[in-house]
Amino acid sequence: MGFDNDNFLDDYEIKELIERFENQLEHDMLSFFDADELNIIIDYYIQNDELDKVNIAAKLAEKFHSSSPLFNTIMAKRYLSVQDAENAIKYLEENEYNSQDPDFYVNLGYCLSLLNDHKKSIYAYKKAIKLCDKENFEDIYSSIGIEYMLIREYEKALKYLKLGLRACPDIAEQYVEIANCYFFLDKGEDAVDFFKSEIDLNPYSIDAWMMLGNCYLRLHLLEKAIEQYEYVLAIDQHHKTAYVHIASILNELDRYQDSIEIIEEAFRNKVEKPLLYCLYGEALAKTGNKLDAVTNFRKAIEMDENTAEAYAGIAFIFCEEENHESAIKFLKHAIKLAPYNTDYLYVMVEQHNKIGKYKSSLKYLKEIEELSPYDVGLYIAYMEVYIMLDDVKKAVKSIEKGLKLLGREPALLYRMSFISFVNENYSMGMMYLEEALSIDCDGVQEFIDFDPNFVLNDENIVNLINEYQSKNNK
């Protein structure tokens, strides 16, 4: 937010200035500081998130320097420190046409960003670069890059984020934004190449290795991702996130014994994290050790009672044991902590279906619809509940609603076909079946599984399926 314009003071002098201010503050004997000094003091406390002292320094500026050219900048910084752009802009606008201070334009750029005027924000930041010392502006490039991201100009964003990389105080965060730009541009392979080049510059950069692993993860190259996270552990055997990522991937690949081994290695290295205990519990449960799994989920809760994954993990074990009431109890905890997790909501629907509480199922499906209306599984789930309620009309309407919203989704078309056959509307059933086959012939097995006896004993249906399978195999 603020621009480092402290060249007339070196680090030692700034330290002395802050000590003098704090000493006076401690003894309630605040005296005169000139405007430049107060500007530096405010920057220092903003960077250290001591906003009460920002206000104290700003009040001194009001008392002694209301006519100073720096006054408006100081007051703007005061309001920007709490992201109050509405008040900050009033002070900045007063200086806009006579300021040659790059610090002013940096603060104006930040303020305009908060006001969602990103193009003007970019202009202000670029003006700051023109006005400032050639060796003292690289950090502004990062701000320009973020603004270009916000207006979806990702090529320009990449250019400026890279220019600002070496001056960025948080290189890991900058790497995240650079990776996002590449993936927004559908250039995941270029992202991999970029982070490989970063590793060539610094082979011991944990941030670069982690981001390279994350890029492979986004490209669904899971084994390659694991390899990069293992390099991280070779540099730092206590890196919590690397252990979590490796264990998560191994669980996803159903390599549960490997997951158990890497998590136990983490524990031997005194690395503990609630999510690690959850992943351990999941792997143990999948290898048949459910009691130990529950013990580890409970350890996660002991470490952090807000760990939704732990409650969900216990719930899933109860689901497998057909203990639906207990599963629902723990799922409620998980959903309360992670209300946007539709996976938990779908399991809640399944559990209520199994105990015949269909109204509750519909309630949770409504929550899913509000969160994820373009999920094809939603309309299938609605259909299933209405079928259980013997309300075929509403089941059909659910599928029709999904088709209207999502287009000709084969999973929905196969279901419309089957419902049409059940309703003895044979020609409509054949029409929907042919349309589904023309889009996704491979998906027909699910259609067959609805009722193999009916489907495989109907010559016309079998011939139609064989016709499209033959076309598909050519």
Image (tube, rainbow, N blue to C red):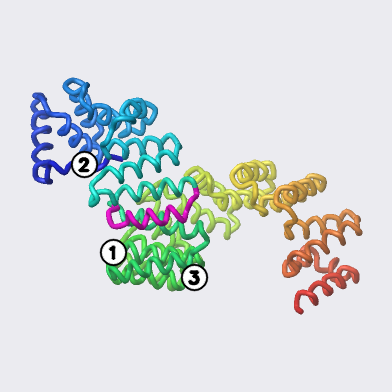
Question: Which sits in the foreground, 433 or 15?
Answer: 15
Q: Which residue, as the protein is rendered here, is positioned at the far bottom?
A: 474
Q: Amino acid at mark 1?
A: His
Q: Which badge, 1 or 3, comes first in the chain's sequence?
A: 3
Q: Judging from the image, what secondary structure is the residue with disc 1 in?
A: loop
User: Which residue is disc 1 drawn over?
Assistant: 238
User: Which residue is disc 3 drawn over?
Assistant: 221
* Residue 99, image quadrant: top left
Give me the C-alpha separation between circle 2 and circle 1. 39 Å
The secondary structure that dominates the magenta segment is: helix
Q: Quadrant of the N terminus?
A: top left
Residue at the location (27% across, 49% down)?
137
Q: Which badge, 2 or 3, comes first in the chain's sequence?
A: 2
Q: Residues within 10 Å of mark 3 (few under 14, many from 20)?
A: few
Q: Is residue 123 above or below residue 291?
A: above
Q: Which residues are magenta?
A: 152-168
Residue at the location (42% across, 45% down)?
147
Percent across and percent down for residue 282 are 47, 62
* Residue 241, image quadrant: bottom left
**Magenta-span inclusion, residue 160:** yes
User: Which residue is disc 2 drawn over?
Assistant: 5
Q: Amino acid at mark 2?
A: Asn
